[in-house]
Amino acid sequence: MNEAPNQLFLVAEVEGTLVGNLTFRGGARARTQHAGEFGVSVLKDFWGYGIGRALIESLLGWAKDSAVVRKINLRVRSDNASAIHLYKKLGFKEEGVFTREFLIDGVFYDCILMGIDID
């Protein structure tokens, strides 16, 4: 990934083992560079320890300190209730839905679009 003021890559380690990561990428053009989307991932064995929350809080702090990022977006599978709950606790709001966005083992799942303004 190229260095840019609207891109971030974080990792979470436990005793030298990579257990999670977060990637944020803002728009490439001047008119969209203020907004971007992130994805976060934590190994299942490490769910429930606050690792995902810590990664997202680090992203939010970084964005608030930046002179560029003013909007953070995410996509979450509609049946991922624990992630949706966490995102809402951190201030993200539901902004829309893509229906049938994911197809897993022959089953369609909707995708909830969420976002938070950074002011």
Image (cartoon, rainbow, N blue to C red):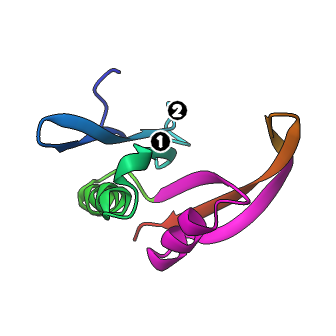
Is 26 rendered above or below residue 92?
Answer: above
- The residue under the point 49% across, 58% down is 71
Left or right position of 66 against 52: left
Check whether the beta carbons of the residues at disc 1 and disc 2 lie within 8 A of each other.
yes
What secondary structure is found at the residue carrying circle 2? loop
- From where the camera sits, is residue 88 visible? yes
What secondary structure is found at the residue carrying circle 1? loop
- From where the camera sits, is residue 42 visible? no
Left or right position of 21 against 78: left
State the count of labels.
Answer: 2
Residue 62's disc is none
- The residue under the point 38% across, 64% down is 48
Circle 1 residue: 33
Residue 107: image quadrant is top right
Is 50 rendered above or below residue 3?
Answer: below
What is the crowding at mark 2: few (fewer than 14 residues within 10 Å), some, or many (at least 20)? few
Residue type at mark 1 is Gln
What is the crowding at mark 1: few (fewer than 14 residues within 10 Å), some, or many (at least 20)? some
Circle 2 residue: 29
Q: Is residue 46 magenta?
A: no
Q: Is residue 98 magenta?
A: yes
- The residue under the point 49% across, 56% down is 72
CA separation in Å, label 1 and label 2:
6 Å
Q: Please state which of residues 98 and 118 is positioned toward the viewer in this rendering.
A: 98
Left or right position of 77 against 83: right
Q: Please state which of residues 2 and 54 is positioned toward the viewer in this rendering.
A: 54
The percent coordinates of residue 115 (x first, y second) are: 58, 63
**Span of residues in magenta:** 71-99
Is 42 rendered above or below residue 30?
Answer: below
The percent coordinates of residue 50 (x first, y second) are: 32, 64
Residue type at mark 2 is Arg
